[in-house]
Image (cartoon, rainbow, N blue to C red):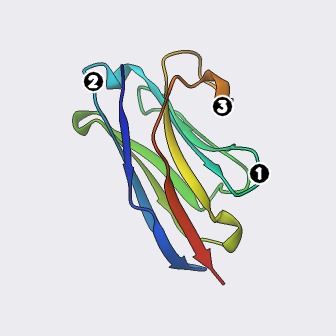
Amino acid sequence: QVQLVESGGGLVQAGGSLRLSCAASGRTFSSYNMGWFRQAPGKEREFVARIHSSGWSTSYADSVKGRFTISRDNAKNTVYLQMNSLKPEDTAVYYCAASSGRWSSRTDTYDYWGQGTQVTVSS
């Protein structure tokens, strides 16, 4: 199994930046597609970004495209989410997830999830 541990969340003013990290256990990390999702209070968990196991393909939600960048370092078993030009509507708990299946943005296609890290963007 894969265990995911997130870090990097916090409080930031609108227009600021944060970088989230997700450290993964397991020798097969490089075989997993990885994704970032977020969930605001009272709302459904939504897709933010994903990166192929190879690292050669990425995909983003329209709401974050051009502002967020997902990357991975398979040698360090870590996936990152660089978040720039943050907006109050980005406030949510952010989760990283791993998928051994198909390349997808759907929540139910991911097998393993981190505990989540809070990101709060103030006006």
Mark 3 vs mark 2: which is more N-terminal?
A: 2
Q: Are marks 1 and 3 in contact (CB under 8 Å)?
A: no
Residue located farthest toward the top when viewing the structure as drawn = 101
Q: Which residue is mark 3?
A: 107
Mark 3 and mark 2: Cα distance apart in space:
21 Å
Residue 74 drawn at (x, y percent): 29, 33
Mark 2 and mark 1: Cα distance apart in space:
32 Å
* Residue at x-position 34% and y-position 24%: 30
Residue located farthest toward the front when viewing the structure as drawn = 42
Left or right: residue 107 compared with residue 58: right
Residue 20 sits in which quadrant?
A: bottom left
Left or right: residue 108 compared with residue 13: right
Left or right: residue 82 compared with residue 29: right
Using the image, determine if residue 4 lies above or below residue 108: below
Q: Which residue is mark 2?
A: 26
Residue 55 sits in which quadrant?
A: top left
Q: Residues within 10 Å of mark 3 (few under 14, many from 20)?
A: some
Q: Residues within 10 Å of mark 2 (few under 14, many from 20)?
A: few
Q: Any mark on residue 43, and which?
A: 1
Visible in this render: residue 16?
Answer: no
Q: Secondary structure at mark 2?
A: loop
Q: Secondary structure at mark 3?
A: helix
Mark 1 and mark 3: Cα distance apart in space:
14 Å
Mark 1 vs mark 3: which is more N-terminal?
A: 1
Amino acid bearing label 1? Lys
Q: Secondary structure at mark 1?
A: loop
